[in-house]
Amino acid sequence: MYETIALHLRSSENIVVLTGAGVSTASGIPDFRSSEGLWTEDHSREYYMSSDYFFHDPEDFWKKYKAIFRMKLLKNYRPNTVHRFIQELESEDRKVSVITQNVDGLHTLAGSSKVLEYHGTLNRSSCPTCGRSYSLDDVMAVPVPVCRDCGDILKPDVLLFGDLITAHDEAEEIIENADLLVVMGTSLFVTPFNLLPYLAFEQDHTTSMIINNEPTDKDHLFDYVLHEDLSEAVRKIEKHLK
């Protein structure tokens, strides 16, 4: 299996990688939707992390947002072997696009040149009135960040519950041009992200594979299925890429 996966990775010219929380857990970032994740511990957190609650009480929203997402720790996180493996697939004759559910920015930090952050990012916030963008440093400098132009309270660029997903059409366009789709570290539970593999399934020119530590109910969509710890799987695949 590892040799076959390596063969496809080596011979493909346009690779699209879909990634989920499992890619970032090795960097110490919790999987918020796992069986022991934060969302399952307290369902009210979904209410507090909603667009409705932000506009209802933005000051209290920011207090809870920074605590839930452990914002003080965000800069301590670093790309792991899986992030670096994906980045190193890029070459002069191979295009690699990453479409990620993760909001930690680690794919970009690892050097991947084409990253679509499907659910947004923790690393930026914007003014809901004028659209001016602010960095994580700006957000962390004060308890409640406000726009220097408008004076309005900033809204995180991460997708909140109730926000419209705006990246789906772009994600579909990226996959339409792929000759290889690789899904890594996601249970493919969250809609509409979990609809993206269907597009590859319907395309004769796209080979697809999923690498995840446990089965998903979408495994039947893929040509190759590997259930294993991602870091270990990457280590074995790399042996055949050399």
Image (cartoon, helix red, strand yellow):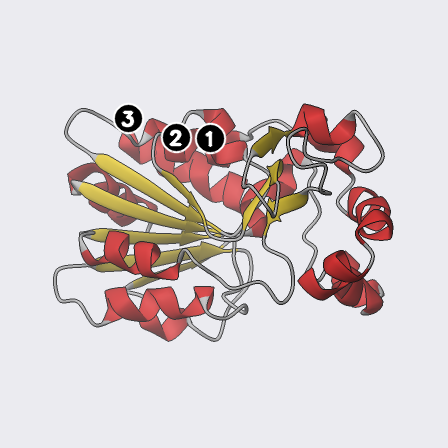
- Secondary structure beneath dot 2 equals loop
Residue 38 in percent (x, y) is at 78, 57
Distance from label 3 to label 1 (Cα)?
24 Å
Residue 108: numbered disc: 1
Marks 3 & 1, CB-CB < 8 Å contact: no
Inspect this view and state whether residue 37 appears. no
Question: Which residue occupies 75% across, 45% down?
Answer: 69
CA neighbours of label 1 inside 10 A, class few (<14), some (14 to 19), many (20+): some
Residue nearest the observer in this picture, 75 or 22: 75
CA neighbours of label 2 inside 10 A, class few (<14), some (14 to 19), many (20+): many
Relative horizontal placement of residue 136, taking residue 206 as reference (left or right): right
Residue 112: numbered disc: 2
Marks 1 & 2, CB-CB < 8 Å contact: yes
Distance from label 1 to label 2 (Cα)?
5 Å
First reached walking from the N terminus: tag 3 or tag 1: 1
Relative horizontal placement of residue 113, taking residue 187 as reference (left or right): left
Distance from label 2 to label 3 (Cα)?
20 Å
Residue 194 in percent (x, y) is at 44, 68
Residue at mark 3: 242
* Residue 96 figure quarter: top left
Mark 1: amino acid: Thr
CA neighbours of label 3 inside 10 A, class few (<14), some (14 to 19), many (20+): few
Question: Which residue occupies 46% across, 30% down?
Answer: 108
Q: Quadrant of the C terminus?
A: top left
